[in-house]
Amino acid sequence: MKDRILLLLEERNFSALKPVISEMNEVDIADFLEEIAPDDRLRVFRILPKSLAAATFVELDRDTKEALIRSLTDSELKSVIDEMFLDDTVDLIEEMPANVVKRLLKQSDKETRNIINEILKYPKDSAGSIMTTEFIRFREDMTVREAFRKIRELAIDSETIYTCYVTDRSKRLLGYVTAKTLMLAGREQTIGEIMDTNVIYAVTTDNRETVARRMTDYGFLAMPVVDGEAQLVGIVTVDDAIDVLTEETTEDIARMAAIAPSDKTYLKTSPLELFKNRIPWLLILLVSATFTGLIINAYEARLTAISAVLFACVPMLMDTGGNCGSQASVTVIRALSLGELEAKDIWRVLLKEIGAAMLLGVTLAAACFLKLILIDNLLFGFDGYTPMRCLVVSAALFFTVVIAKIVGCSLPILAKAVRLDPAVVASPFITTVVDALSLIIYCSIAVAVLA
Amino acid sequence: MKDRILLLLEERNFSALKPVISEMNEVDIADFLEEIAPDDRLRVFRILPKSLAAATFVELDRDTKEALIRSLTDSELKSVIDEMFLDDTVDLIEEMPANVVKRLLKQSDKETRNIINEILKYPKDSAGSIMTTEFIRFREDMTVREAFRKIRELAIDSETIYTCYVTDRSKRLLGYVTAKTLMLAGREQTIGEIMDTNVIYAVTTDNRETVARRMTDYGFLAMPVVDGEAQLVGIVTVDDAIDVLTEETTEDIARMAAIAPSDKTYLKTSPLELFKNRIPWLLILLVSATFTGLIINAYEARLTAISAVLFACVPMLMDTGGNCGSQASVTVIRALSLGELEAKDIWRVLLKEIGAAMLLGVTLAAACFLKLILIDNLLFGFDGYTPMRCLVVSAALFFTVVIAKIVGCSLPILAKAVRLDPAVVASPFITTVVDALSLIIYCSIAVAVLA
């Protein structure tokens, strides 16, 4: 398929290309356009039927969109914007630089411009910012027949027609009717008779991730959004909800690895941008590692007198502490983000983690003792590992595990309680805290027992 | 709302409770049932209208489902199963213990039992295992009027009616028609005239995550699934696709933190289960830390002669290496899982990461040199940090960063290339590899320069 299109493109056979490409899905056309040269891209884009052109445009990545806008004529641009759904236009305006935005707004009609400005006023993370204002609104006294007629009239402009909303004179939300209910109802029944009045809705100021999560929990295709006066102002559709969840998960995962979140795809990110996203936390963590160095330095004079062999166990202790901490923190962060866990559950979480930590600590300490005696001492013949020293290392390991679990599970919850993003205090941050604590424990035990 | 229900429940006022609870969404009823005592749960479940009872049952967690099944009579259980969608019944059978499954199958009719057995044959991770066999099938020569009649007859049993599929006599997929198209079409047009023949479909053996990701990329509400003979055998609906993506992301995140994935929610997991999910990797990583110990031991005799102060920098070096490695691996794993990246992109990724690593390495090495001189030497007065030693540490840091990025970005891609889950080689594993390599570099440089 793709080879055939490329061949037709190479032959400049646009009359043969048009029917083939017009049959394709917009997502596939967008992928294809991103791969070819800008000149060809413009030519192919121009042969697309109007509504397909708009649908394809929405699926392009930021840079390709911007380049295309710059090469389209004013009237071409206007026809694309007219065909686009309002929420997609809003997204476009949010991601384009100021001079492009100016041209875009100039090509939209006045009414659209007003709605766009309204939506742009909502905070970036709110339900208002991801809703669309195109939906079908019924009145209670309409018949099913009239409802179908209204759907037929409006459908081309409405992003989803499968859930329609019923409002009173002052636009307050009364209920909803699904396309399924409509199809199963008698033609002469009224909307008031068949509507479901138990509507689950969001408020414009609700957090967009919470709304998206609720939508997918309930399995909704759309969710109505009301403003402060309980008036229906828009709907959030399931495709936007999925986008929000994917974006938020990518952000969480980035934060867990101490990376500043970015909305570019990996292959589109330049090494310089990777550098910028990654350097801040690395620098902070590097400087905070001063503490671990200080701790070793402080104990050094007394420890070298005992056994420098003990230092060889520091990497193992620190890695295990880091791993235990990130296990706990990642589990808790994911549970918080899925809404399985709330800040008030902190005591239940602590009890559970301490329980698990005891089991893990004993198992790991035993394994560590055996490893030191059997592998390091007997197998490799480092006779510095006396049973007493191995016991010191194992005891330190036990306490490290317990502390790592406590720190790892409680920091994300505390972050959530003070309204920080829990993902911010993920693995690397926790590793640093645990490293310092475990070194203090290790050195204290070693000095106390062996000095 | 919830307080009112609890009050009615306490008063045993089931006749007042029934209308209130019947108005609620099944997800909310399920949440409520999970919180109350088993006896009350059974009583409340029994007053639910049939189809709501089935919808609620599907939303309960595994343990509550099992307990409820055990306390329902055979005829009650049969009515729940009869009302459930087939794919939900299959999910239920997959998660229940053998004796419960036996009772469930006994209560389903023969036809259902046959379909269930067919679906259970598909591998756990395949599109076949998540599809439902309930969908609406049209023939080309039907009119829109006949299609509406068929929808009305079947709708109650079909999980989604918004996309209907057109097949020929041998059940091969020809095209699809959305409810929107149907509503906008003339009553006497034939399905053949209005159907879209450009169908994007999955095969029963496709990976379920790939199918779910494609569905959400295309923004589909449903995707048809065909078997090896191109016959339409089922559809995957968007709610199941979202569930698959959420599950797979949770699994990825768990693996990134060296935890065995589990499908229980956090609060339902006991400390013993947490222990079981977490101990395997911790033990493996603990034993593999033997290498880092060995490296220090091997260089120790020569290094202590130079300066034990150098050991104080080991935690900082190792942490930075670990952090750099996990930044790269987490970014690459996420990009692989979103389909932004494929195994063949490895050279582009390597170039990008090495570019970023050079910038990061130089910045971090400079910061490290300044930190050692200014903070550790001048501020805290550890005069062991001579400029030459600080230079050794900084040089080692530079190489550690570069190696960490190379290992961190390439291991997940190599894992993918040999068909392993990339998330398996995430942070903890990479940290271990990077630790060993960075210690060798550090010690070698120190011995070469300072000995």
Image (spheres, coloured by chain):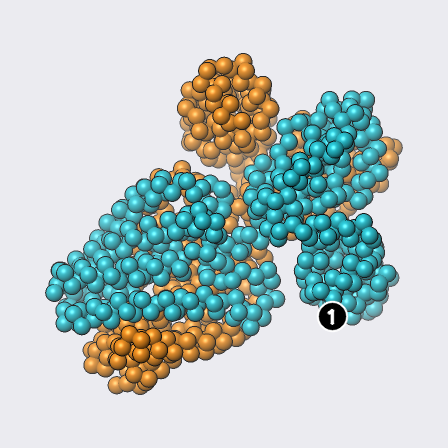
Chain colours: A orange, B cyan
Image x and y of residue A309, in percent: 25, 76
Dot 1 alpha-carbon crowd within 10 angstroms: few under 14, some 14 to 19, many 20 or more: few
Residue A369 visible in the picture: yes
* Quarter occupied by the C terminus of chain B: bottom left
Above-or-below relation of B82 to A132: below
* Side of A26 where B65 appears, left or right: right
Image coordinates of residue A53 in percent, x first then y, are 55, 23
Residue under label 1, please give it: B37
Quadrant of the image occupied by residue A166? top right
Q: Position of residue B141 (x, y in %)?
A: 79, 25
In the image, what residue type sits under mark 1? Ala
- Residue B81 lies, with reference to residue A403, above or below; the image says above
Does any portion of residue B368 appear in the rendered image? no
Q: Is residue A314 above or below residue A73?
A: below
Where residue A264 sits, quadrant-wise, is top left
Rendered residue at 52%/70% (across/down): B275
Residue visible at 51% across and 50% down?
A: A249
Q: How many marks?
A: 1
Which chain contains the residue that carries disc 1?
B
Q: What residue is rendered at 46% in x and 15% in y?
A: A11
Give the image location of residue B234, x and y in percent. 70, 42
